[in-house]
């Protein structure tokens, strides 16, 4: 937003230089990014009048111009082809340093002395977007009203400094010069002069009889007002208005359009002028666009609309894109005699979506999408009508239409002096705050007396950013002065920073898995709902109870993941499609589980540890490649559990998990104090799931509950020295029914072996002709060792036989 100091002076006289005013605004939270001095480099550029022009005798395209500069006549040679005798043009005198860095000196062109240069708009440093297309080529032709010899900066209104504001999204109110003036008045204490709006109406009849407004979408348009102007006298707007528009970075077009732009910049409320005769029956309809409906906007582009777009229409066609840009079929032209002026309030989010969808940003949409003041609809319309009448642009038809559907009640914000002081760290009194609120012109109803004083503040409609007490505290702080708020150091007990226990466990898990050869990945928390079908989950499965995203960026991100596995499977599929068949990855992250549906409170976010391996395991060059399988990932899981010092983990066959192979999967549980704790599942991916993701080989996955691991994990403990006494190994081979898992055998061995059984290892599993059907042979090596003595053969044999007896008694084992 650019604010002209000259324009600002119409409403407030702060008595400050532009740079000083910019500094004060910035300190109060309205950042001034830059102060533009538009007359820079124009010190020796004046208005000259071309008295005579003759062809250069040595060049066909050069002219020898005699130019009156007010202080004498100069001969200037130019190659411009658009100048004529009697025109007034900018003349750069010798010694001038133009904005583009060009230095003007006396010169000789093809034998003719030239004392100066005629200047184009570009050479004067004028922005192209503020110049009419016909003035962008060749020498800039000035108005006949410009006085010969006058500095060109004065003739073009470039002596005015301009503040370039960098506004935060919450201060869209300062997209209006008048509201910036309110800020200046509050900061400096200067008097604020609000424009007096009185409309001089003319003619018979009334606007209400000639204009009808129907709002079909009240949720997208809360108010629509309209006025009529007749006998339009289309032409250029006054020089002062053009100069102010150019200072704000806008190009003057014609008097009626310039007035709407002027009022938009002044009051922050966009307006639009329609050719009334092109509106069928004078009937304005605010509706959603029809699917596939097309509209050629004022920029000449045909745009295809959809029902998400709000349009201004008549009974036959759309005539404008609400809040964004008007239609070419209703624009003001040389043949326009009657103007219908629109002032409305549109839903900010809808305007933002429409502008983004169509790639069409305008000064109007910039304001509507940030939210405009619904109370200024009629004020802005009447201010435009006032200018139309005062500048004799047209006749203002008496009356106007105002369709106001949703009345807005001012927001009352309760606040307390104590709480504001607590937020700011200040010791201001209620009187101090009252003085600040008065400077801001905020109505306040005070309650109570003394230190416990409180009040109710009515937030002005032009300040929609004021929503709560914290916003009022910010207003107090910026007007009081951020630099005056005392600086204090935080108080509290100083502690040594360290990781929490859950953070420590997560780090140990990640280190262990990386050490086992897995790579950590991070996948999206948002997934496509079709993953639940790919996993083969039945309708009643708990993982089907998901949190849906109300406004997903795409279908691929429609729900929050109930499990991490879809992300890992997609990573595996992406690698497989690129012929990377060997993969070992893991992820530690959150999943999402709603407590009830429909969702009325935040869902639970249980963290999981998930892993996937597929292809062949890494192997030394001297070995043969070996495909990863259930037992490969099981070994990694056992290493992880050992690192966390989680003992007595039961591995039970799992047949009910739909995305795992029913014969090659297991569930991990731990029993503590009679309570069975579920750790998670591990198994080979079900063939149907493997096919759905187009995976190669037989991938194996694991998903463990991180909260359970954190609960059961123990600290690393003290160092255990290497044993000093020798160990003794004994083997045993037994025949057992197939339905007895090895974990039960090992549980009996561990329980019976006692303190001298150092470890055991399964080294052989056999099924064949020598073993009865329905049975298998398991062979173990048991190592016996004592930390304080050398064991005797009798001790070892006795304990070994006790273990065998326990296996016979409890599991029915038969030893080979």
Image (spheres, rainbow, N blue to C red):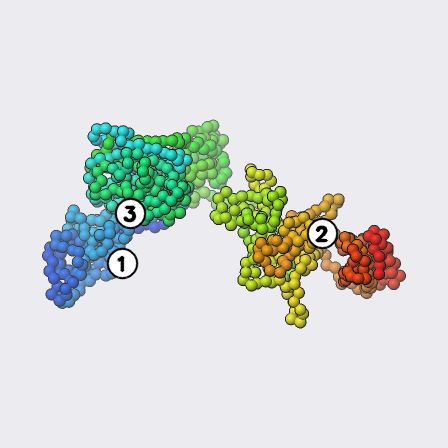
Residue at 54% in and 58% down? 574
Residue at 16% in and 65% down? 109
Q: Label 3, label 2: how many angstroms apart (C-alpha)?
A: 75 Å
Residue under numbered circle 1: 100
Q: Earlier in the sequence, mark 3 or mark 1?
A: 1
Give left or right: position of 749 versus 302: right
Residue 641 vertical placement versus 319 (above, below)? below
Residue 575, percent across and down?
A: 56, 60
User: Which of 659 and 14 lies nearest the eye of the viewer?
Assistant: 659
Residue 14: in sight, yes or no?
Answer: no
Residue at 23% in and 28% down? 205
Q: Which of marks 3 and 2 is nearer the N terminus?
A: 3
* Front position among marks 1 and 2: 2
**Label for residue 250?**
3
Give left or right: position of 581 versus 37: right
Q: Residues within 10 Å of mark 3 (few under 14, many from 20)?
A: many
Q: Label 1, label 2: how many angstroms apart (C-alpha)?
A: 81 Å
Residue 483: in sight, yes or no?
Answer: yes
**Label for residue 704?**
none
- SS of the residue at dot 3? loop
User: Which of 99 and 669 lies nearest the eye of the viewer?
Assistant: 669
**Label for residue 653?**
2
Residue at 49% in and 36% down? 419
Q: How crowded is mark 2: few (under 14 residues within 10 Å), some or many (20 or more)?
A: some
Residue 730, by quadrant, is bottom right
- SS of the residue at dot 1? loop
Residue 288, percent across and down?
A: 38, 39
């Amino acid at each position: 937003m650019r604010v002209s100091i000259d324009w600002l002076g119409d409403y407030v006289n702060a008595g400050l230089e532009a740079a000083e005013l910019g500094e004060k605004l910035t300190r109060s939270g309205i950042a001034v990014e830059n102060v533009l001095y538009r007359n820079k480099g124009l010190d020796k550029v004046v208005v000259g009048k071309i008295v005579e022009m003759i062809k250069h005798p040595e060049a066909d395209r050069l002219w020898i111009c005699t130019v009156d500069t007010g202080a004498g006549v100069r001969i200037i040679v130019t190659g411009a082809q658009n100048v004529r005798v009697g025109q007034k043009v900018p003349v750069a005198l010798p010694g001038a340093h133009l904005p583009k860095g060009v230095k003007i000196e006396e010169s000789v062109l093809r034998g003719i002395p030239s004392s100066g240069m005629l200047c184009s708009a570009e050479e004067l440093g004028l922005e192209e977007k503020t110049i009419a297309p016909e003035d962008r080529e060749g020498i800039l032709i000035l108005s006949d009203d410009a006085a010969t010899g006058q500095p060109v900066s004065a003739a073009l209104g470039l002596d005015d400094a301009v503040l370039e504001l960098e506004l935060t999204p919450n201060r869209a109110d300062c997209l209006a010069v008048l509201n910036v003036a309110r800020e200046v008045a509050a900061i400096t204490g200067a008097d604020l002069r609000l424009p007096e709006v009185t409309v001089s109406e003319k003619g018979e009849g009334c606007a209400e009889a000639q204009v009808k407004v129907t709002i079909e979408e009240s949720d997208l348009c809360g108010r629509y007002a309209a006025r009529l102007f007749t006998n339009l006298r289309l032409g250029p707007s006054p020089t002062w208005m053009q100069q102010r528009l150019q200072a704000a970075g806008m190009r003057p077009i014609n008097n009626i359009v310039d007035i709407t732009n002027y009022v938009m910049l002044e009051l922050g409320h966009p307006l639009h002028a329609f050719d009334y005769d092109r509106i069928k029956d004078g009937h304005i309809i605010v509706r959603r666009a029809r699917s596939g409906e097309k509209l050629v906007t004022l920029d000449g582009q045909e745009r295809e609309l959809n029902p998400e777009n709000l349009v201004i229409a008549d009974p036959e066609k759309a005539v404008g894109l609400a809040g964004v840009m008007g239609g070419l079929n209703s624009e003001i032209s040389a043949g326009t005699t009657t103007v219908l002026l629109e002032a409305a309030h549109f839903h900010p989010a809808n305007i933002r979506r429409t502008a983004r969808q169509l790639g069409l940003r305008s000064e109007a949409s910039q304001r509507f999408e940030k939210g405009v003041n619904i109370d200024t609809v009629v004020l802005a319309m009447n201010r435009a009508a006032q200018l139309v009448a005062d500048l004799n642009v047209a006749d203002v038809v008496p009356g106007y239409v105002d369709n106001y559907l949703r009345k807005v009640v001012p927001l009352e914000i309760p606040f307390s002096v104590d709480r504001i002081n607590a937020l700011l760290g200040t010791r201001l009194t209620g009187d101090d705050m009252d003085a600040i609120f008065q400077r801001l012109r905020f109505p306040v109803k005070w309650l109570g007396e003394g230190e416990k004083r409180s009040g109710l503040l009515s937030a002005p409609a032009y300040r929609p950013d004021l929503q709560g007490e914290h916003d009022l505290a910010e207003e107090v702080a910026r007007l009081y002065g951020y630099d005056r708020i005392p600086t204090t150091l935080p108080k509290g007990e100083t502690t040594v920073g360290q990781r929490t226990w859950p953070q420590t466990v997560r780090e140990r898990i990640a280190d262990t898995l990386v050490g086992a050869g897995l790579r950590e990945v991070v996948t999206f928390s948002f997934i496509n709902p079709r993953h639940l079908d790919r996993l083969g989950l039945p309708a009643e499965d708990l993982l089907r109870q998901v949190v849906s995203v109300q406004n997903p960026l795409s279908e691929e991100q429609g729900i929050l993941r109930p499990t991490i596995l879809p992300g890992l499977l997609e990573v595996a599929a992406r690698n497989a499609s690129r012929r990377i068949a060997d993969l070992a990855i893991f992820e530690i992250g959150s999943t999402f589980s709603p407590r009830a549906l429909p969702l009325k409170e935040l869902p639970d976010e249980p963290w999981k540890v998930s892993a996937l391996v597929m292809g062949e395991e890494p192997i030394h060059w001297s070995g043969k490649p070996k495909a990863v399988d259930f037992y490969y990932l099981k070994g990694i899981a056992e290493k992880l559990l050992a690192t966390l010092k989680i003992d007595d983990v039961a591995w039970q066959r799992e047949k009910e998990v739909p995305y795992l192979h029913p014969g090659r999967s297991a569930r991990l549980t731990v029993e503590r104090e009679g309570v069975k704790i579920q750790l998670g599942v591990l198994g080979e991916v079900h063939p149907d799931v493997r096919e759905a993701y187009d995976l190669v080989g037989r991938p194996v996955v694991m998903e463990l509950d991180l909260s359970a691991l954190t609960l059961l994990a123990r600290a690393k403990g003290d160092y255990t020295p290497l044993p000093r006494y020798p160990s003794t190994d004994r083997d045993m081979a037994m025949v057992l029914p197939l339905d007895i898992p090895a974990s039960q055998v090992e549980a009996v061995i561990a329980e019976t072996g006692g303190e001298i059984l150092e470890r055991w290892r399964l080294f052989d599993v056999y099924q064949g002709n020598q073993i009865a059907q329905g049975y298998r042979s398991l062979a173990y090596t048991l190592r016996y060792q004592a930390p304080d003595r050398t064991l005797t053969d009798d001790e070892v044999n006795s304990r070994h036989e006790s273990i065998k007896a326990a296996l016979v008694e409890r599991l029915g084992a038969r030893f080979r």
